[in-house]
Amino acid sequence: MTEPAIRIAEAVFRWRAAQAPTLDIPALTVAAGEQVFINGPSGSGKTTLLNLLGGVSVPQSGTVEVLGRVLTALTGAARDAFRGDHVGFIFQQFNLVPYLDVVENVLLPCRFSALRRARAGEAAGGSEAEARRLLGHMGLAGGVIDGHRVSELSVGQQQRVAAARALIGRPDLVIADEPTSSLDADAQAAFIDLLFAAIQATGASLVFVSHDRRLEGRFGRSLALAEINRAPRTPAGASDP
Amino acid sequence: MNLGSILGLAWRSLLSRRATAGLTLFALAVSVMLVLGVEKLRHEAKASFANTISGTDLIVGARSGSVQLLLYSVFRIGNATNNISWKSYRWAAALPGVAWTVPISLGDSHRGYRVMGTSQAYFEHYRYARKRNLAFQAGQPFDDLFDAVLGADVAAALGYDLDDRIVIDHGIGGVGFARHEDKPFRVAGILAKTGTPVDRTVHVSLEAIEAIHVDWRGGTRVPGMAVSAERVRQMDLTPRAITAFLVGTTSRFEAFGLLRAINEHRGEPLLAVLPGVALQELWDLMGTAEAALGAISLFVIAAGLLGMITMLLAGLNERRREMAILRSVGARPGHLFSLLVLEATTLTVLGAVLGLAMMYGGLAVAQPILDAQYGLFIEIAPPTPRDWRVLGAVVLAGVLAGLVPAYRAYRHSIADGMVVRT
Ligand SMILES: Nc1ncnc2c1ncn2[C@@H]1O[C@H](COP(=O)(O)OP(=O)(O)OP(=O)(O)O)[C@@H](O)[C@H]1O
Ligand SMILES: [Mg+2]
């Protein structure tokens, strides 16, 4: 049996020591290659959970294991390097570095991870060709890519560039934080189709969080954050937009 | 993760903020240009002063300050308060150990240029720079009573050629007030350029100075006593007094003995100085001004660097999103720290290079003007070791200044992680 993509055990996380925990997750396992949809209302701690999975934050107690590595046992620098090597992120919006062009944005992880640089470079034609191939998969042809600053792209196009970036160098885990919530229904569906196709091609696991439950039918597994999180919703958290 | 890659990001980020980054860079360049330029001017002015007199062992004049004597006798700056008598001059010239003397008589001018009465010995013994003799670009030393030898700048600026007639103005007050128009001079020679005050001087014989003043007392013509140029030739034109004289010794060791002998002369209070010592006194006088200039230079650089810190800090808030994205693709907080340091470094390195280029550009423009207006010849030479040290210090200070925004970015990225609260 292969390692699960994610295994969380008894993880408790507080933003501030004096506050009630935002997350208190006794157990969560995501199998390798699985596509999981996690939903929860705004302020429930979805983004906080993804921070733990990416190793940007660590729980005060308990363990977070990703791809067999116990993140909670690593140093900050090692977690950053691990994230760069193995995890691709797509955020809700403003995913792109404004001063880099489309292809440079896609290749950004290769600047920080030798592993992903090497993997992207293995593709026929090298890493730039690989970036263009991924952009093509996401429905972005050369005409859109070249000669446009990223700020000139539509939001939907920007999200597709972000998806290509999350996939370059074949990371083992892709984490998407409400990547479709600033898109209209048609664009949402199109984006999800493209993302699924691209993910299936690489065999990566996918964790996709959203407050919008209309999307859950498309995933192999769907769960509500409240099911796995024992922490009570704090009044502050509830009123948080 | 290599530094080159972060440097690439820093470069792209600065390019995307061309306007503000460009202005910041320009401000830095201006401050670097000022600091290097001021230092260059100071250095060249000193060199030019030091180059003006060479191979002269003593300068002698009426008793006053040694710096004052040096300034009026050699640099034609300021005036002598007193003359020395011809008798004292002859006495000193005859002292044992004296190889040669060059008398100097100042007080008149020609269209703003000083007129100096001297002897043939001047062309033979006066040396400048590294013991270089005066050379003629045209003509020869004065021979006739009313011959004049022009410095290179005088001839060039006033468009004079050999055999042109010139009229000497009385005093140094300005043109046309009182003129010796009854006794015009012929241009007998034009000296080659020296880069010293010689270029801006009109040379005539001591006798000529005497001749144009025979019918003058004080500042005015004596009424009814006009002496024609022809008649004056028959008179005894031995000068009664001169302003100063230069002394060459038979051996360097004689200089100190002569110095004492002249300074203790009973007949008339005389002052003899060693040119090197007087120059050193001049530098010491200028020391305070130099220190002030140095301090101003420091503040100018500091202002440029403050501008850069301000620009980088002001940009940080709107860049939190960018930092979060970089974190999501594996950047460590330390990477964001070095991104900001490298932006500051890039700006200061470019600022230093541009400043250096602007300094040379400015020098190329200013060189002919300074030469023509002030007789200050600035040599355009490659950067000195001191210039490189200044540039190195500026870049180092720039890197240190970059630590301020870098630390801010570092703190932000720890607090924000991959999420920016807006
Ligand atoms: N950097 C932070 N510092 C302090 N508190 C934070 C921080 N980020 C989130 N929180 C708090 O943690 C709780 C969960 O926030 P989180 O962003 O994880 O919610 P979310 O489920 O992603 O909400 P949304 O759907 O609006 O994105 C909120 O109460 C929020 O105030
Ligand atoms: Mg969120």
Image: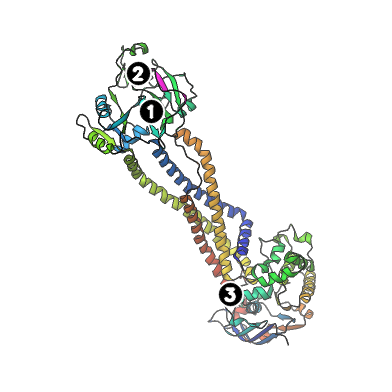
Q: Amino acid at mark 1?
A: Glu
Q: Quadrant of residue A228?
A: bottom right
Q: Which residue is mark 2?
A: B212
Look at the image and tell me whether residue A182 can be seen.
Answer: no
Residue A225 at what x, y percent from top left?
A: 68, 83
Q: Residue at x 66, y 83 (%)?
A: A68
Q: Which residues are magenta?
A: B137-148
Farthest residue toward the left? B266
B110 w.r.t. B289: above or below: above
Amino acid at dot 2: Ile
Q: Chain of mark 2?
A: B
Q: Nearer the viewer, residue B215 or A183?
A: B215
Is ligand 1 closer than 8 angstroms to the Cβ of mark 3? no
Disc 3 is attached to a residue of which chain? A
Q: What's the distance in space between the residues labelled 1 and 3, CA to CA? A: 79 Å
- The residue that mark 1 highlights is B124
Label 1 sits on a secondary structure element that is: helix
What is the spatial separation of the Cα atoms under label 3 and label 2, in whole angstroms? 91 Å
Q: Quick check: do tags 1 and 3 share a chain? A: no
Q: Are marks 3 and 2 in contact (CB under 8 Å)?
A: no
Chain hosting mark 1: B
Q: Which mark is residue A77?
A: 3
Of A15 and B45, the residue lying toward us: B45
Decide: few, some or many residues near mark 1? Use Cα within 10 Å; few <14, some 14-19, many ≥20: some
Q: Position of residue A239 (x, y in %)?
A: 62, 77
Helix, strand or loop under label 2: helix
Residue B142 drawn in magenta:
yes
In what quadrant does ligand 2 lie?
A: bottom right
Q: Are marks 1 and 3 in contact (CB under 8 Å)?
A: no
The amino acid marked with disc number 3 is Ala
Q: Is residue A84 left or right of residue A204?
A: left
